[in-house]
Amino acid sequence: MAYNPAPLERLIEQFARFNGIGRKGAARLAYQVLKMEASQAQAFADAIRDAHAKVHRCSICQSFTDAQICPICSDNGRDPSTILVVESPQDVSAFERTREYKGRYHVLHGLISPVEGITADQLAIRELLARLQDGSVKEVIMATNPTVEGEATALYLSKIIKPLGVRTTRLASGLPVGSNLEYADEVTLFRALSGRGEL
């Protein structure tokens, strides 16, 4: 085992806390920080501190913002009758890049996952239900990832939203562009078939 000075080891441990970054990746990032000029390292630390202090959840959609209400929720040009439910603020950015969706969003900040000990109470579900109380929302679109946790979360939400008289839909899923039918699994093919549309 290689020896690292204590401050470097602490930095590696902090980077290793990020999802998807293992020990080697964390060490690589830590060494990159050490290669920075002192002013760059200070700017990096200031950016982390500033983001942590000033960025918080929008009081309406729960996405990240530095104001009380995010720019999407405060945009009167957006359709308030449609809410697209996503797992994370990064998903909002992905949909915004398409420039196709004109409604509002709701960020859950996770998915129901009994294996990881994440329950519905830990997600921003109460806030979503509060938005549906005045009857102005006509459709809630479930845009969680097509994983076991994403499907379970979408199903759970649809069961508690439908009694409110709000239409609940799920994003179509199926074959990605450029894929080969021969290598697609049965679930993907079934979804592609059942979600077919007019040409």
Image (cartoon, rainbow, N blue to C red):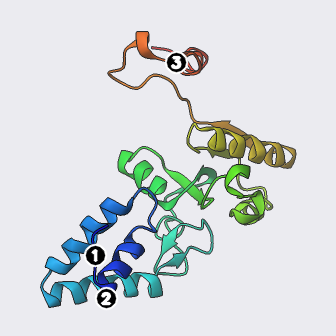
Task: Look at the image and tell me in which quarter the N terminus lies.
Answer: bottom left
The residue most toward the top is 182
- Residue on which the image places disc 2: 46
Mark 3 — residue? 185
Asked whether, in this view, residue 70 is left or right of residue 119, the answer is left
Q: Relative to 16, is 69 above or below?
A: below
Which of marks 1 and 2 precedes in the sequence? 1
Q: Residue at x 27, y 70 (%)?
A: 2
The spot of residue 185 in percent (x, y) is: 52, 18
Kind of element beneath mark 3: loop
The amino acid sitting under disc 2 is Asp
Which of 190 and 24 lies nearest the eye of the viewer? Answer: 24
Q: Which mark is residue 163?
A: none
Label 1, on which residue?
Answer: 3
Q: Amino acid at mark 3?
A: Asp
Mark 2: give few (<14), some (14-19) or many (20+) Cα within 10 Å.
few
Nearest the viewer among 90 and 128 is 90
Which quadrant would residue 12 be assigned to in this image? bottom left
Q: How many marks?
A: 3
Q: Residue 37: x and y, percent? A: 12, 85
Q: Quadrant of the C terminus?
A: top left
Q: Rounded to the nearest whole Å, what is the CA distance between mark 3 and mark 1?
A: 46 Å
Q: Is residue 129 visible?
A: no
Q: Say above or below: 125 vs 52.
A: above
The first of marks 3 and 1 along the sequence is 1
Residue type, numbered disc 1: Tyr
Kindly report the distance in space between the C-alpha atoms of the residues bearing marks 2 and 3: 47 Å
Q: Earlier in the sequence, mark 2 or mark 3?
A: 2
Query: At numbered mark 1, what does the secondary structure look like: helix, strand or loop?
Result: loop
Label 2 close to label 1 by CB (< 8 Å): no
- Residue 186 or 198: which is nearer the viewer? 186
Q: Secondary structure at mark 2?
A: helix
